[in-house]
Amino acid sequence: MFGLIKKYDVHMCSEVKGIITLNGNPVEGVLINRSLKFAHKIEKEDQVITASDGAFNMPEVVVESKIPGDMFSHEVTYQLITAIHGGEEYELWSSKLN
């Protein structure tokens, strides 16, 4: 009973950082999107734009949720990171953690 009231910290994603290049040259202005879901519910969506050196950084994400205390829940974490450049979307990372 008390597990349904308590909130738990759920680690959704580690810090993400990198450099976007095209033909070995850094690309400025690329939109990086991150979508994180826990138990099939969107918990966090954020985005950044690459700097002049092509670099980007997204912080670690930890959310609070009552779901881990629910014995009937199916705890699955989804991670999707994409880059949009020149009108095209590129998948950089996707993961499903059971």
Image: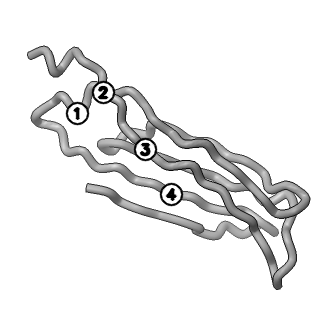
Residue 60, position in %: x, y? 54, 42
Give the residue number, with chain letter if any, for mark 3: 12
| Residue at x-position 67% and y-position 67% | 89
Q: Amino acid under label 3? A: Met
The image quadrant where one finds the N terminus is top left
Quadrant assignment, res 70: top left
Between residues 52 and 43, which one lies in front from this camera angle? 52
Residue 78, position in %: x, y? 39, 53
Between residues 26 and 46, which one lies in front from this camera angle? 26
Distance of label 1 from label 3 (alpha carbons): 13 Å
Q: Earlier in the sequence, mark 2 or mark 1?
A: 2
Nearest to the eye among marks 4 and 2: give it: 2
Give the residue number, with chain letter if any, for mark 4: 80
Q: Secondary structure at mark 2?
A: strand
| Residue at x-position 33% and y-position 44% | 40
Q: Amino acid under label 1? A: Pro
What colour scheme governs how the chains and residues are painted in the rendered image of this protein? Answer: one colour
Q: Secondary structure at mark 3?
A: strand
| Residue at x-position 81% and y-position 69% | 86
Q: Amino acid under label 4? A: Leu
> Residue most toward the right?
52
Mark 1 packing: few (<14 Cα in 10 Å), some, or many (20+)? Answer: some
Give the residue number, with chain letter if any, for mark 1: 68
Q: Secondary structure at mark 4?
A: strand
